[in-house]
């Protein structure tokens, strides 16, 4: 009888430890957050409406952008990671207003760049300029796809946080 009770206590202790470990993991995912800012490449000006930024870490490229972003996470419906030959890409799906904005700026700036800044983590501690995809055609589907200057783990955290923020924003808009 004593052996059975000791075995039961051991199993109970293991169950408690596993529950706590799993609970901590999901708790961190619940706090995941992210922000995205999509800027448009522009000419340098003297009024202060533009700024220079370095995109890419290994071989930085200097790009002039409009200081005010054209799109943010407030326009985001969802984000996902796409598998591509040799790596991955991030696809950002914007709402109707964001789609119109994306279409307008892509039609007006062929040959220019969208410049994307991302932040992620519990307190948005991680952040940098992630990409500057070339505008080759008018974007009519409201989706911006780019290959980020980020590890797969960083991209996963970024996408998870963006989807969490987008869900919160959509929930508040429905109220």
Image (spheres, helix red, strand yellow):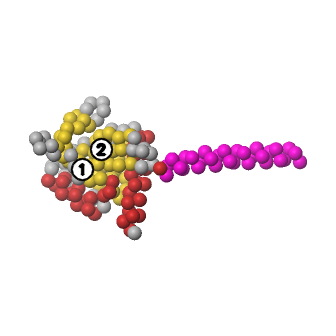
Left or right, 6 with respect to 60, comes to: right
Question: Mark 2 or mark 1, which is nearer the start of the sequence?
Answer: 1
Is 101 situated above or below 13?
below
- Tell me if 144 is positioned left or right of 34 in this view: left
Q: CA distance from mark 1 to mark 2?
A: 9 Å
Question: Which residue: 39% across, 64% down?
Answer: 172
In the rendered image, the quadrant that contains the C terminus is: bottom left
**Residue 96 location (% of width, % of height):** 28, 63
- Which image quadrant for residue 58? top left
Residue 69, which numbered label? 1
**Where residue 162 appears, x then y in whole percent?**
39, 51
SS for callout 1 = loop
Q: Residue at 51% x, 47% y: name it.
A: 28
Q: Principal SS element in the magenta part?
A: helix
- The one of 115 and 142 positioned closer to us in this rendering: 115
- In the displayed orientation, state which residue is furthest to the front: 47
- The reply, left or right, for residue 153 in relation to residue 44 is right
Q: Position of residue 85 (x, y in %)?
A: 35, 42
Which residue of the protein is positioned furthest toward the bottom in this rendering? Answer: 175
Numbered circle sitting on residue 36: none
Mark 1 and mark 2 residues within 8 Å of each other at the beta carbon: yes
Any part of residue 19 in sight: yes
Taking the magenta stretch, the answer to whether it contains residue 35 is no
Quarter-wise, where is residue 167 in the image?
Answer: bottom left
Residue, disc 2: 117
Q: Which residues are magenta?
A: 1-30
Q: Secondary structure at mark 2?
A: strand
Membership of 12 in magenta stretch:
yes
Residue drawn at point x = 41 percent, y = 64 percent: 171
């Amino acid at each position: 009888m004593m052996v059975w009770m000791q075995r039961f206590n051991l199993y109970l202790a293991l169950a408690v430890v596993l529950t706590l470990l799993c609970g901590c993991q999901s708790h961190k995912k619940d706090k995941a957050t992210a922000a995205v800012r999509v800027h448009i490449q522009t000419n340098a000006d003297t009024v202060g409406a533009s700024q220079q930024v370095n995109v890419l870490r290994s071989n930085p490229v200097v790009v002039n952008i409009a200081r005010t972003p054209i799109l943010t996470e407030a326009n985001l419906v969802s984000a996902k990671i796409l598998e591509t030959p040799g790596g991955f890409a991030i696809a950002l799906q914007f709402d109707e207003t964001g789609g119109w904005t994306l279409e307008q700026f892509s039609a007006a700036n062929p040959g220019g760049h969208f410049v994307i800044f991302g932040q992620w983590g519990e307190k948005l501690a991680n952040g940098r300029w992630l990409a500057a995809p070339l505008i080759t055609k008018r974007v009519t589907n409201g989706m911006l796809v780019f290959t980020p200057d980020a590890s797969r783990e960083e991209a996963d955290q970024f996408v998870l946080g963006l989807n969490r923020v987008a869900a919160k924003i959509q929930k508040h808009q429905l109220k």
